[in-house]
Amino acid sequence: MKLWIFACKFLRNIQIGYDNGLWAVSALDKRTSNNRWSKAQKMFPFSRGVIYSSTDRTFTMPFVTQSFPTNERVDDVWPETWEFPFRIQPLGSPRRLLALDVAEHTWPILQHRRNPTHCVNGMNGLTVFVPNEIDDADWQRILSDLGEIPDKFPEPEDPLRRIRNLI
């Protein structure tokens, strides 16, 4: 299973995403945006994700994507301009937080990492829209720590896989 981790500086922006059932990434320069967009196209509906608050070093709000990212900028949702928005179904709220130092001891994806914010994809600006491979037990652990509703969604499916199977 792929886990998409998205870093965010401000808890208020996480709350706004939760309230709107929407997530995106901060807009940067054109070159960086082009690189991000090519990666964003690999995230499909029903992908699993979690938010990392870089300011207070906590994880929060596991979610399931409900749409593909779109190649557009959003300036009417968050106080700043964000890009590549996609619909989400939060499985937990920003009220539930787990400190990075606790997660390092309990989440297999973070264990034995010298510097998880640089090793785990998505926890820094260089690896936005790059997923991490985890197994179902890892996802269930994340949900037990941060989730508030069960994950009863299907697995994501690459729409091109159907076409490849027909050829």
Image (cartoon, rainbow, N blue to C red):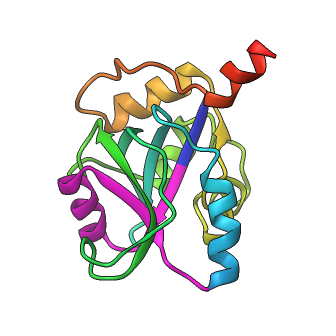
**Total numbered labels:** 0
Q: Is residue 36 rendered to the left or right of residue 62?
A: right
Residue 102, x across and y down, in percent? 46, 47
Q: Is residue 120 rendered to the left or right of residue 48?
A: right
Q: Is residue 83 rendered to the left or right of residue 92?
A: right
Please tell me whether residue 73 belongs to the stretch shown in magenta. Answer: no
Q: Give the range drawn in magenta.
A: 5-29
Residue 132, x across and y down, in percent? 66, 42
Instruction: Tell me the quarter of the image containing the N terminus.
Output: top right
Name the residue located 54 percent from the left edge and 20 percent from the top edge.
137
Q: Which residue lies furthest to the top in this view?
A: 166
Residue 97, x across and y down, in percent? 31, 51
Q: In this view, does 133 lie above or below 43?
A: above
Q: In this view, does 167 lie above or below 13?
A: above
Query: Would residue 136 be seen by someone viewing this image from the given angle?
Result: yes
| Residue 23 picture quarter | bottom left
Instruction: Tell me the quarter of the image containing the C terminus.
Output: top right
Residue 127, x across and y down, in percent? 67, 62
Name the residue located 55 percent from the left edge and 36 percent from the top edge.
107
Q: Which residue lies furthest to the front in this view?
A: 167
Please tell me whether residue 10 belongs to the stretch shown in magenta. Answer: yes
Q: Is residue 35 rendered to the left or right of residue 87?
A: right
Q: Could you say which is closer to the camera, residue 1 or residue 167?
A: 167
Q: In this view, does 3 lie above or below 76?
A: above
Name the residue located 76 percent from the left edge and 14 percent from the top edge.
165
Q: Which residue lies furthest to the right in this view?
A: 167
